[in-house]
Image (spheres, grey):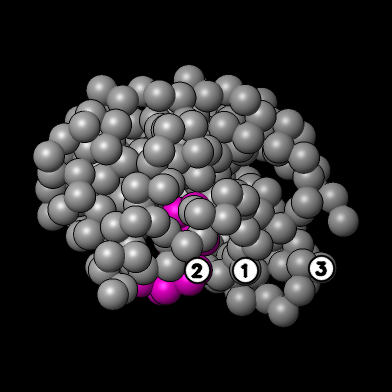
Amino acid sequence: MEIKFPGRKKIDNYIEKTDPEAIQNALHEAQEIMYDAWDADDAINAIQLIKKALRKSPLCADAYSYYSHISGDSPLSKLAYLENAVYVGEKALEAPVSDFKGDCWSIIETRPYMRARACLAACLWDVGYYDKAILHYQEMLALNPNDNQGLRYILSSHYLDLEMINELKVLLVSYPDDSSPFFLYTTALLAFRDKSSSADAAAREAISGNHYIPVFLKGRTKLYENNQEYITAGGCDEAIEYVNNNLLAWIRTPGALDWLADINKSMNK
């Protein structure tokens, strides 16, 4: 079931001809409908609710974003309406996005914009527009340094994929209190590459946080994801998420997998 999203000309006409208060009221009603769409039992019902939300307001960015999540469209076909999702998300704000820098996400009205931009960045990466995707993630972290969306983990994987090691190291030290496996295992890998004396200790710290990852990495293959909305700290699902996004970097680092396996074995004696 397809949705024909409004183009930018129609969106701009709507903004130009509609009273600002009416725009915000309609947007609020559309957002309430989207909460029901997220809770819908199946895609058909969700899409019907998405259409209803768009009839209320063409500025409902979550309608575009969530459709991209459930539609099954190819990444390339998603690009056009995800770009519009970011566009309407920005237009829906009552001030320029730059005014919210540092506080995006903590201000609820900015969340549809941030969700839309995260969807667009992921889509750009899937299509192969790596530089554009990375720029979006970098700018989103500047808008919301607290990173409630966990974008730093995606960005760290992308930096590793592209061997942007200087940028990766800057990102890692930007969150010194982050004890997630996504940062700890990548820190250990970089220490191993650099032949650092801290490598073994870094590996032990990472393994203590999630002991499934060395085993899954040793399998040298990506794993089935269950697409849960949330992942369990220290759990299998967290390990799968890390391995699926960082496996290739470990494989192409000579000796890294055997080294990590040896550290893991020594900890299990």
Q: Quadrant of residue 225?
A: bottom right
Q: Which residues are magenta?
A: 230-243
Above or below, 67 relative to 135: below
Looking at the image, is mark 3 or mark 2 earlier in the sequence?
A: 3
- Drawn side of residue 221 relative to residue 192, left or right: right
Inspect the image, locate mark 3, and give the three-letter code of the amino acid beneath it: Ile
| Residue that mark 3 sits on | 44
Q: Quadrant of residue 233?
A: bottom left
Q: Nearer the viewer, residue 104 or 141?
A: 141
* Residue 154 seen from this side: no
Cα distance between the residues tagged 2 and 1: 8 Å
Numbered circles on residues, count: 3
Which quadrant of the figure contains the C terminus? bottom left
| Residue in the image at 31% along x and 73% along y | 268
Q: Secondary structure at mark 1?
A: loop
Looking at the image, is mark 2 or mark 1 earlier in the sequence?
A: 1
**Between marks 3 and 1 in the image, the one whose residue lies nearer the viewer:** 1
| Residue in the image at 29% along x and 31% along y | 193
Inspect the image, locate mark 1, and give the three-letter code of the amino acid beneath it: Asn
| Residue that mark 2 sits on | 237
